[in-house]
Image (spheres, rainbow, N blue to C red):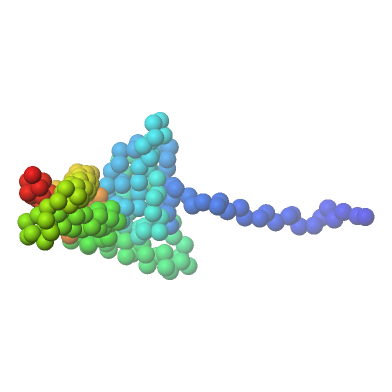
Amino acid sequence: MTLDLQGSAPRRRAFHLPFPRHDRTAHIRIDLARCAACGRCAEACPREVLGMISVLRHRHVHVDRADECRGCQACVAACAQKAIHPRAVDGASGAASAAGAAGRRERSVLEAGQRPTSFNHRAFTTLMIALTGLGLPATGIANHLLGIAPLTSARHAWMSAHNALGLLFSVFCVVHVVLNRRALWSHLRGNPARGLSGISREAALAVVSVGLALLLLVGHAFHAGR
């Protein structure tokens, strides 16, 4: 048996990680060694692409939603440490170029103060939970004030359970508003380009309105149930 020592070199097989990279998207690349974990890039991103790792001694920014990146480079402009760099786009990749152009147009819209409405899953979840709890104290109020049924001991206990659940949902709404206070205050001041945290104005106002209405209903139910 002879060995072919002059043959071509063996071809290396490409190795792909089974999980996505958290330091880059199709348009940007993060130098984690230079990241100061200031959070400015995450606040500047209009699509919540970036998030923060808050582990002690390992604080840094990471890519949370790479598919949402449109290449607007708002994070690149916001980074004071120059830790975020735009990635070179291949000229043959027309889709990536189009996405980058669309992202830059979106950034210009944001800088002009015309932030488009974006879906916020936290606000949507809070709103749905608040609407679900809205009927709980309302049922107790109707039973007590409208005389639908006599106020027996069992019904009084059922009303107390309604009030407790309504109060729990109210606290959940208040916590959500507190966590998004920067974006809400920015919207109320009419300056949507500052303090962005991904919540739209309509969602924020809806959560606040439902939360206030729920607090009033729960307070009235407690007063009427005495």
Residue 225 percent across, percent down from the top left: 10, 47
Q: Would residue 190 be visible to someone looking at this image?
A: no
Residue placed most toward the observer, 118 or 29: 118
Furthest residue to the top?
57
Q: Nearer the viewer, residue 89 or 25?
A: 25
Q: Can residue 145 be seen in this view?
A: yes
User: Quick check: 61 left or right of 124?
Assistant: right
Residue name at image x 25 percent, y 50 percent: 197
- Please name whichever residue, 67 or 119, is drawn nearer the observer in this view of the structure: 119
Image quadrant containing the N terminus? bottom right
Q: Quadrant of residue 9?
A: bottom right
Quadrant (top left, top right, bottom left, bottom right) of the C terminus: top left
Q: Which residue is drawn at 30% across and 38% down?
A: 38
Q: Where is residue 178 in the image (x, y as percent from the top left)?
A: 19, 43
Location of residue 207 in the rendering, given as x and y in whole percent from the top left corner: 18, 54
Residue 219 vs 100, above or below: the answer is above
Q: Count numbered badges in the picture.
A: 0
List x then y, in percent, for residue 180.
Answer: 21, 47
Which image quadrant is residue 71 in? bottom left
